Image: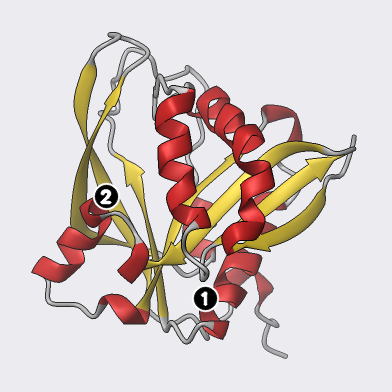
Amino acid sequence: MSHPTIMTRCGEEILPYLDAVAHLRIEVFREYPYLYEGSLESEEEYLTAYARCPQSIFVLAQDDGETVGISTGLPLAHADSSFQKPFLEAQLNLHDIFYLGESVLRKDYRGQGIGHAFFDKREAHARQLGCSQATFCAVVRPSDHPLKPKVYFDNHALWHKRGYELCELQATLSWKQVDSGLEQENKLQFWIKRDLSALPALRQTPPI
């Protein structure tokens, strides 16, 4: 089994990777639960916003020069207004919070600990920027969704181990769905880590 190289790029350093990242996001996000039918045009617009922010980060998993995984982040104060809105309504300080955009990884590379590496790199970057908290959101699907695979494992255990808790904040985003071919509204629930200085549970030294 091949083990990709993990590398980070920030701000305008992201630009040479935008095309590969766009194709990868479209490929992986077609899967359940996102069911996202993306276009290169919309991807370019979305990803270029990261390149315009000097404090953004791309964590790339590369295998023999090919991008097989990507994880993104930027300060919440620079994120899309759809992600800022729930925090502003809750009267939280955006400048304290780092937004973890998304992580996508090809199936053949899952289960190798790359997800933890994605979190490690982004959280370290957030701490360097002076952020005390980190957050991300995940799409909400009913448990009986017709396109849910018979064998499906969500990432909740990983997120809990990393110190993230499900919170009451939600965002609403629209995208074209692969199952209907139509633009539909989707609810996304936020997870938050309120103390970025805390080590993830699986990395803590057990008591003697």
- Quadrant for the C terminus in the image: bottom right
Q: Position of residue 169 (x, y in %)?
A: 19, 59
Q: Of marks 2 and 1, which one's residue comes earlier in the chain?
A: 1
Answer with the quarter of the image where residue 117 lies: bottom right
Q: How many residues crowd mark 2 within 10 Å: few (<14), some (14–19), many (20+)?
A: some
Quarter assignment of residue 64: top right
Q: Which residue is mark 1?
A: 126
What secondary structure is found at the residue carrying circle 2? strand
Going by the numbered disc 1, the residue's amino acid type is Ala
Percent x, y of residue 113:
72, 52
Q: Circles 2 and 1: CB distance less than 8 Å? A: no
Q: Position of residue 39 (x, y in %)?
A: 44, 22
Q: What residue is rendered at 74% in x and 47% in y? A: 61
Residue 198, relative to residue 166: is it above or below? Answer: below
Whether residue 207 is visible here, answered yes or no, is: yes
Q: CA distance from mark 2 to mark 1?
A: 21 Å
Residue drawn where x is 63% and y is 53% of the image: 14
**Mark 1 element type:** helix
Q: Is residue 34 left or right of residue 44?
A: left
Residue 110 in sight: no
Three-letter amino acid code of the residue under disc 2? Gln
The dot on residue 189 is: 2
